[in-house]
Amino acid sequence: MSRLRAQVAAEIDVVRRNGEQLLLTLGIPLMMLVFLSTVDLLPTGTEEPIDFLAPSVLALAVMSTSMVSLGIATGFERSYHVLKRLGATPLGRPRLVAAKMITVTLIELAQFAVLVPVAYLLGWSPSSPAWPAAVVAVLLGTAAFAGIGLVFAGRLRGEVNLAALNGLYLALLLAGGIVVPFAELPRPLRAVAHVLPSGALADVLRDSLGLVGTRPGASWLVLAAWALAAPVVAARTFRWD
Amino acid sequence: MAAVEVNGLTVRYGDVLAVDDVSFTADAGKVTAVLGPNGAGKTSTIEVCEGFRSSAAGEVRVLDLDPANEQRALSTRMGVMLQQGGVYPSARVGATARHYCALYNRGVDAHELVDRVGLGARRGATWRRLSGGEQQRLSLALALAARPEVAFLDEPTSGVDVNGRSTIREIVRGLAADGCAVVLATHELDEAERVADRVVIFDRGRIVADGTLAELRRGHDEIRFRSAPRLDLAALAAAIGMIAAQVGPDEYVVDAPPHPKLLSALTAWLAEQGHPLVDLRAGEQRLEDVFRRLTAERDAPRERRAR
């Protein structure tokens, strides 16, 4: 237990000491939430933009922490031989993976503790929100995105991995069904966005938190499939040094 | 049974044979230096012992465990210092020491550990702000956090200044004095000479010599001196009754024990001829000379073939 705790503390220290990580996990989602809800820029299709934006930005927060933040940090740990060095301690791989999952969950809790109250302050009033369903969606989304982040981190070298994950983040943010509604995407892109984990997570979160999803049943299936497949691929392809 | 037993180890990278049928042992309470030029197979050998790398052939036992399959069991008793890196650049010295002390959970106090490697004033510094030598000392501290029975240190003094080196040497000697089997890879002869009880010399994937320093030097007495270029070697041989060989532009070796009569004949002849005596060394070869001789012996047949 003490080894796991020590590893979690070290993981959190890395996140805390890297300002760009904080910008990514909290700064960008918060800015999007505030900016896009006060400046009516997006064709959200809802009467109040915040009703669309609040669940969408929660999906973005999950993606930024579990895919980008985790993936970049782990990629650099591989490049700097940190994972190799830890491999020669009694920590063990299962506990290392557990520590990373706990850390991601803690960061997400912190993100939600900021984003949800801010959304309410901005006038968000979801009708009959299904929070338990939202929590399940977040857990599935976390597994899916963490898997994707680790597929990149397990193969690409530090800087290349950093660029690739940031690029993917931007692409999924804009065209992956998160902040731009499916209906506004060009038709071929819309079909792709529906089977992406970003679109699926955003869709089920919007469906659970006050809106009617575009096609929630299919999105749950897509999300569950990614949550299963991505970690399996990561575990099979990951190189520790 | 020795703490580290390597028997017939072979490591391949694709078609490249990095380590070729290597055997040696390392004992508890001793510092064993694995010495050789870069690319000689030292790191590959050590990484097999640490459990990071698998071998193509041969058997390796560390503390009577198989490192490849029992790395976890070994890890609680083994100190490791990688050739480079191992710490996240933004991690601080004090926090990193606490982290590893907690991971090993062997009752090592992180605060004392940082003091012990001379980084007490750098506790709050991040890894990326440390000098090369300070990084090496922190890496060494992380190996000590295991309170190890066996320690593998890969180039612990590379990039370290003079003061840092003596700190590292003291710690390495202290580890051995506490009964740890220390295996230290280095390409620096000087370092091996100062710190090791025993030296295993690697060259191109093979072991060319293995023994205590005294054993390696024994039987290779010589007189080595520097004087004017192009001495008349025939006249010199007539004067001292031994053949001298020119080994450098102005450097000569007489393959003989340092007998006073021989030395006086040599210096008398130089004086008669009006030649200078720039440098004179007589007796046991230094490790550097042993190393040069051994690697030259391996090269000689190849060159002959090439011609």
Image (cartoon, rainbow, N blue to C red):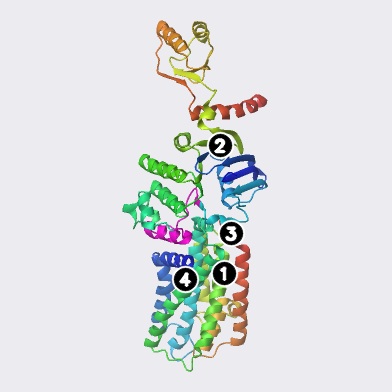
Res. B306 image quadrant: top right
Q: Nearer the viewer, residue A20 or B297?
A: B297
Specify few, some or many for label 2: CA neighbours under 10 Å numbering under 14, 14-19, or 20 or more.
many
Which numbered disc, 3 or 1, marks the residue closer to the eye?
3
Please say if the residues under marks 4 and 1 sit with CB atoms less than 8 Å apart: no
Which chain letter goes with mark 1? Answer: A
Residue bearing the label numbered 4 = A103
Could you tell me how far apart the alpha carbons at marks 3 and 2 are, in whole angstroms?
Answer: 32 Å
Secondary structure of the residue carrying tag 3 is loop
Residue bearing the label numbered 2 = B200
Residue that lies at the very extreme toward the left in this rendered image? B121
Please say if the residues under marks 2 and 4 sit with CB atoms less than 8 Å apart: no
Could you tell me how far apart the alpha carbons at marks 4 and 3 are, in whole angstroms?
Answer: 21 Å
Query: Residue placed at 59% from the left, 70% from the top?
Result: A231
Residue bearing the label numbered 1 = A148
To the question of a shared chain for discs 3 and 1, the answer is yes
Secondary structure of the residue carrying tag 4 is helix
Res. A133 image quadrant: bottom right
Eyeballing the image, is A35 above or below B182?
below
